Structures are given as C-alpha cells and as structure tokens.
Image (cartoon, rainbow, N blue to C red):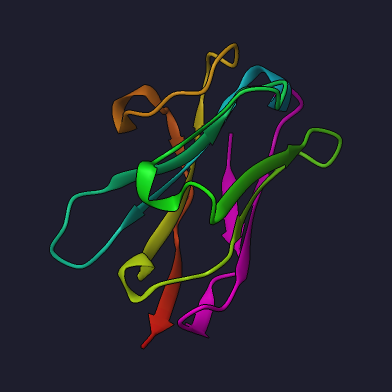
Amino acid sequence: VQLVESGGGLVQTGGSLSLSCAASGRTFTTYAMGWFRQAPGKEREFVASISGSGIITLYEDSVKGRFTISRDNAKNTVYLQMNSLKPEDTAVYYCAAAPAGGRPWVRPNEFRYWGQGTQVTVSS
C-alpha cells in the first residue's frame, strides 16, 4: 500500500485546512486509516483514526470537536478536515494504514504503512 498526502499549507489561527490521503491497491476497505502528526523536537502523536467501514472513529482529546476524519472507500481516500486551527497544531501530518480494519487504532506501531507527510503551519 502506498499513501500520498496532500492539502497541507499555511493558515492563520482559527482557519481551516483539509488534508487528503490517497491509497493505492484494491483492498482499501480492509485497512483502518489514521492521521498522526509530529512537531519539531517532539514524538509522533496520534490525531485521529477510522475503521475500514468508516463507522468507527477515534480522536485525540485536543482535536475533538475541531477535526473530522472521514473516508471515501470508492476513491481509496481518507480525509482530515481541520477547523479552528491553533498554533499548537503546527506539525508534519502523516497518513497511515493498519491492516486490521475492524476497528480504528491509535498506536504508531499498529500501523504498517505510512505516507511521506505534509506540513501544516498555523500562524498566530
């Protein structure tokens, strides 16, 4: 599975960005998908994840109510809509795929495939 993120950029505090992650392959629905982020000098952290069916989602507490993860299995694509962005959301955002799609996962070692990352910068 190859993952390609897009949609990062520079936005002011309170603004919105939408990230996309396109996956290769014909078994997209068997993968749970997740978004992680890594700020300079910090460890990679969980942001959100979604089950293969798209029914179950999980969010890190600091993004609940502001970010929404979704997927379009017909397009092999997962999305992260980010609203009310804050400077502390600044990071490289990574898309990841976990081979067990029955539930969303949260730990990086549960995900097998990773994208190259896309930079999100929120200015104050």
Residue at horizontal 57 percent and vertical 25 percent from the top: 32
Res. 66 image quadrant:
bottom right
Q: Nearer the viewer, residue 43 or 24?
A: 43
Where 22 falls versus 72 (above or below)? Answer: below
Res. 56 image quadrant:
top right
Direction from residue 38 to residue 70 in the image, left or right = right
Residue at horizontal 37 percent and vertical 23 percent from the top: 110
Instruction: Return the x and y of residue 20 as percentages of the image width and height.
Output: 65, 56
Direction from residue 53 to residue 91 in the image, left or right = left
Where 81 falls versus 25 (above or below)? Answer: below
Residue sitting at the far front: 65
Residue at horizontal 51 percent and vertical 23 percent from the top: 104
Span of residues in magenta: 1-27
Q: Nearer the viewer, residue 99 or 104?
A: 104
Instruction: Return the x and y of residue 85 as percentages of the image width and height.
Output: 48, 70
Residue at horizontal 69 percent and vertical 41 percent from the top: 70
Residue sitting at the far left: 41
Instruction: Return the x and y of residue 18 as percentages of the image width and height.
Output: 64, 64
Res. 47 image quadrant:
top left
Question: Which quadrant, please, contains the C terminus?
Answer: bottom left
Where 26 falls versus 88 (above or below)? Answer: above
Residue 6 colored in magenta in the image: yes
Residue 35 colored in magenta in the image: no
Direction from residue 105 to residue 19 in the image, left or right = right
